[in-house]
Image: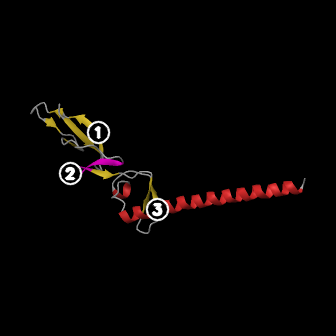
Amino acid sequence: MKKVYNYDNQGIFLGFSFAQVCPKTKTDLLPRNATFKEPKGSLKNGYKWIWKGDKWEQVRYYNNEKMYNPNNDYFEVNFTGINSCGLVEEIPQEVLDQREQQRIEAENAVKVEAETTKSLEDRIAQLESIIEGLTK
């Protein structure tokens, strides 16, 4: 029995099975949504194998991730499929750069807030010490 590689209606790799043999011709039968071609190479993290009609391609798979549209607004991808249904093209580098800049700015804001909080805590401790000295 020959191994076949199965995919769903959108071409997403599902796994493998074995072809049945035709009793008359003794040839391997290829079921619907299957190919004899094996996906080659190791699959990158966050990618899925997609059957493109004559070959397998690795496509970045965005599921439950924040995605950005051209207006730099984000939306959550919570479903599966191809392109608008979950499998989408790579996020443009400019959007990745903006996201990194936003992450850095948020990180810096947290640091400033922590420093401000520490400074206020120190000042409160000084004032409490002064008040304690005045009440003795």
Q: Position of residue 26 (x, y in %)?
A: 10, 32
Q: Is residue 75 above or below residue 14?
A: below
Q: Where is residue 57 in the image (x, y as percent from the top left)?
A: 25, 50
Q: Where is residue 55 in the image (x, y as percent from the top left)?
A: 20, 49
In the image, taking residue 12 as reference, residue 119 lies left or right, namely right
Q: Going by the picture, which residue comes out furthest to the right?
A: 136
Q: Is residue 110 above or below residue 33?
A: below
Which circle's residue, 1 or 2, is located before the other in the chain? Answer: 1
Disc 1/disc 2 C-alpha distance (Å)? 17 Å
> Which residue is more in the foreground, 124 or 21?
124
The amino acid type, in three-letter code, at marker 1 is Gly
Disc 3/disc 2 C-alpha distance (Å)? 32 Å
Start-end of magenta stretch: 46-57
Which residue carries the number 3 mark? 74
The amino acid type, in three-letter code, at marker 3 is Tyr
Which residue carries the number 2 mark? 53
The amino acid type, in three-letter code, at marker 2 is Gly
Q: What element carries label 2?
A: loop
Q: Going by the picture, which residue comes out furthest to the bottom?
A: 71
Quarter occupied by the N terminus: top left
Q: Position of residue 84 (x, y in %)?
A: 37, 58
